[in-house]
Amino acid sequence: MLVQTLKPELPNWPGARLFCSTRLGGVSAHAYASLNLGEHVGDDPNCVASNRQRLEMAWGAKPVFLQQVHGTDVIRLTLPQSDQKPFADACFTHEKNLACTIMVADCLPVLFYLPQAKLVAAAHAGWRGLAAGVLEATLHRLAEYGLIEECKIWLGPCIGPQHFEVGEDVRKAFCESEPLGSDIFFNAFKPGKYLADLAGLARRRLLLQGISQIEGNDSNPSWCTFSSSELYYSHRRDGVSGRFAAGIALV
């Protein structure tokens, strides 16, 4: 089986190649079936290596995987690329065919493209990183090279607002620092619990930074990792699960 991608739903950005895998098209078994790309989740390392090789062959670019820690560090990827995986939750590059890659299983992958600067970037936006400012940190680094108002952004699949149950601590993390409407992305579910719109919160953060070219996840159920078990891994749904990836490379 070939690696399965979301190419029909990916934007056509001349000069860049985007990729978002599904869980289909790999060799992993059981809870990790089948295109698990995560080395850290308990899967057979040989299966993960084979899956990553399949991804690189299908993509036509070398994916660079980070050790994601739900933080805000943004690193630059350069050639030659070390085999060591840096601790960071966002990366960018000017190098062709070197792919900024984010692994997820409910969190939101965010891809960036500055055409005039010939620069691509990717960020891992779980609720902790999003609240801490990982998107703003990424845009701040990109602003060193071009006008971020010209930045194109794609939001990938993540857990949807129908299933992302959070507590008062998560709501406060957003609403206390953003009094102008962030609470609309939290629907009361039961006492002390809310259903949160992760993609909606990301769009709001991006709009506040002057970004208008935002494509992809519009919080529609079709983008929800939790409710699409045949396509996506979901840590919240399954507990033990693999990871799929989204990324972007210059061509």
Image (tube, rainbow, N blue to C red):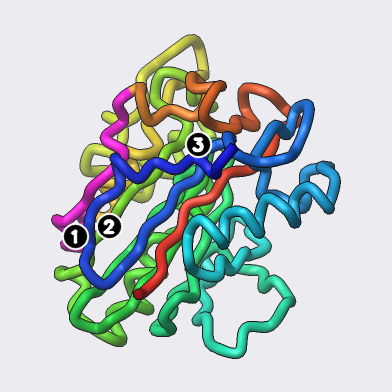
Q: Start and end of the magenta stretch?
A: 207-220
Task: Using the image as rendered, state which of residue 62 and residue 208 is in the foreground.
Answer: 62
Identify the image quadrant of residue 32: top right
**Residue 243 colored in magenta in the image:** no
Kindly identify which residue carries mark 2: 153
Other residues around mark 2 within 10 Å, as few (<14) / some (14–19) / many (≥20): many
Between disc 3 and disc 2, the foreground one is 2
Kindly identify which residue carries mark 3: 170
Tell me which amino acid carries mark 2: Ile
Contact check, label 1 and label 2, Cβ < 8 Å = yes
Q: Secondary structure at mark 1?
A: loop
Other residues around mark 1 within 10 Å, as few (<14) / some (14–19) / many (≥20): some
Res. 165 in view: no
Q: Is residue 194 above or below residue 225?
A: above
Task: Using the image as rendered, state which of residue 142 and residue 216 is in the foreground.
Answer: 216
Tell me which amino acid carries mark 3: Val
Measure the C-alpha gap from mark 1 to mark 2: 8 Å
Q: Secondary structure at mark 3?
A: helix
Identify the image quadrant of residue 71: bottom right
* x 30%, y 47%: residue: 10
Kindly identify which residue carries mark 1: 211
Measure the C-alpha gap from mark 3 to mark 2: 25 Å
Between disc 1 and disc 3, the foreground one is 1
Tell me where residue 245 appears, x and y as whole percent: 54, 50
Tell me which amino acid carries mark 1: Ile
On screen, residue 176 versus residue 69, left or right, reads left
Other residues around mark 3 within 10 Å, as few (<14) / some (14–19) / many (≥20): some
User: Of marks 1 and 3, which one's residue comes earlier in the chain?
Assistant: 3
Q: Is residue 209 above or below residue 127?
A: below
User: Of marks 1 and 2, which one's residue comes earlier in the chain?
Assistant: 2
Res. 65 in view: yes
Between disc 1 and disc 2, the foreground one is 2
